Amino acid sequence: MADPRTYRPKAGEIPTEPGVYRFTGDGGRVLYVGKAKNLRARLSNYFAPLHTLHERTRRMVTSATGVVWTVVGSDIEALQLEYTWIKEFDPPFNVKFRDDKTYPFMAITLGDEAPRVMVTRNTRIRGAKYFGPYPKIWAVHDTVDLMIKAFPIRTCSDSNYKRAMQSGRPCFPGQIGRCGGPCSGRVTIEEHRAIVDDFVAFMSGHDRRFVTDATKKMKKAAEQQDYESAARYRDRLLALEAVLEKSAVVLADRVDADVFGIEHDELSAAVQQFIVRGGRIRGVRSWTVDKELDMETAQLVEQTLLRVYADAGRDSIPKEIYVPAVPDDVDELAALLGARRGRGKVKVQVPMRGEKVALMDTAVVNAKHSLQLYKMRRSGDFVARSNALGDIREALDMDEAPLRIECYDVSHLSGTNIVASMVVFEDGLPRKDQYRRFSIASSTDDTDSIHQVLTRRLAYLRGAPDPDAPAETPDPLADGEVDAIAKPKKFAYPPQLLLVDGGLPQVGAAQRALEESGVEGITLAGIAKRLEEIWVPGSDYPVILPRGSEALFLIQRVRDEAHRFAISYQRQRRKRDITSVLGEIPGLGPSRVKQLLTAFGSVSRLKAASSDEIAEVKGIGPQLATAVHDRLRSD
């Protein structure tokens, strides 16, 4: 571990211009790349006293052996150079984009003599127009199949096209009706180019014009009793409408925008991108990010946009980009994207109202689901779980791997409705049938609550039978009444590892409960949420598990599950309490109580409402509203 003072540059040596800096480690490996509007001001933050730094920042500066910087002409150049170096050096302390797989696109090769439509993952075909990305390969194939029914353009390969044009015989896809290019012999190159233009225009968002045109032509052909032509226009109309149904309308016509939803915790983040063209969702992307240093949402937004648009074509950058939080240097970022786009400005902003807010909410919900799925799949891997349990054993100096882990968390509302949760993980997987909830009548603080809960739980382990010993079965032939076969008692199985949500104070309270109970053989630890530090009794320094390790991932998941379980119980208690209070009011039955809670959305809003506002709820008159108002204000 290096001392940052050994390589700290003098303040006068660091320029005050914008630039990009690199922390390097042994062998010159780049550990972290960052940018700054003022290099001197930014770098001085890294060389503050170690105890004042964020834990992960402290690990980075003590792992480094040097720092170098490069001055650039503007903040925009700093953005460009930062991304270039991150991509080149892949620094371990910068964010890691995981599962950023290559998504399939629909491409139209406009640079060819006879453009073709194709499904590809290559986004660098010269002169091609791209649509997508699509979440699944079958989704883009389905869209292509529908589109060539409405706009029959070339689908055959270049070699088949050249062979057909030289020989005068249609290509094989053309013979079976799957290719509408000049090689099929049905259209000329000029006529084919016109159909291609219509194909691109429809996919670009000019939807209704083609639907209206197909409808008019179908009706006109039917009036002229040209039923074959009417049938063709009908099939084209059905194909167009099917494509439109696959692309949900979310914004006004001709709105081109990208919407990014982000959900993250201390270790990982999930990003969901909706690509909206012509007011419709034309593509969806999602990926996960592993975080090494602590990052706010705004910083993740900046890194995400640089990642997405750094190598994107001009047509892939929309006029509007909606994000959950705006980076500090949003003006420079927008200018950089505008320069890459090559026409007009790019707006990077947080949606404030209407349909755009609703779409952002949908993107965030999808990001939450993606993050949850990522964690579930990662924790479901047997090898990963085994490695995690082994690493935890080594980190906490345990005699054996913690095959049973119990975690406790306390939840309350401003000191009221105090509850606690106990969750159980065995072999790295949750055992929800053994979860428990605790109600706490009174407590001075969280440490007192932890002490109470663990005292109650550990009382069940005093004199508990050996869980590996067979249960005693009474002899059915013996005299007297036969008792039921003995079952394990409640809370009978002791954990190898007992976790509490919190730092040294909570660990100290849990240690007191353990000592008072006389139970031995249980390893105790606490996890502090802000820095993801593992605290053990009697230690002045926390145990730091490597970022991105399976061990830290498992412990975080156990802690988060305990927190979720406690919060859900606390909310149930609050709802039950307010329901019982309202139920005491004469004339206010369960249905009207439900109407009140539904109308105001939360207990706090109902308590803050005036009697006139309460009276506006259906079925609640002025007299009953006054009674509700007075009863809630009296508590």
Image (cartoon, helix red, strand yellow):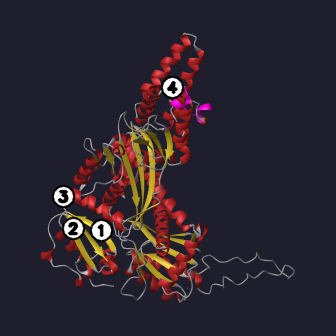
Residue projecting furthest to the right: 477
User: Which secondary structure, mark 4?
Assistant: loop
> What's the magenta region?
173-185
Mark 4 Cα-neighbour bin, 10 Å: few <14, some 14–19, many ≥20? some
- Residue 477 appears left or right of 552: right
Return the disc, 3 or 1, that comes first in the chain's sequence: 1
Eye-nearest disc, 1 or 2: 2
Which residue does the numbered mark 2 point to in the structure image?
70
- Percent from the top left, x then y, of residue 9? 19, 79
Q: Residues within 10 Å of mark 3 (few under 14, many from 20)?
A: few
Quadrant of res 109: top left
Q: Toward the viewer: 449 or 76?
A: 76
Q: Secondary structure at mark 3?
A: loop
Task: Determine which residue is flagged by label 3.
Answer: 74
Type of amino acid at the residue the image marks with label 4: Val
Question: Looking at the rendered structure, which numbered label has been put on residue 187?
Answer: 4
Q: Magenta stretch: residue 367 in it?
A: no
Locate the N terminus and report the quarter of the image it occupies: bottom left
**Sequence-first disc among 4 and 3:** 3
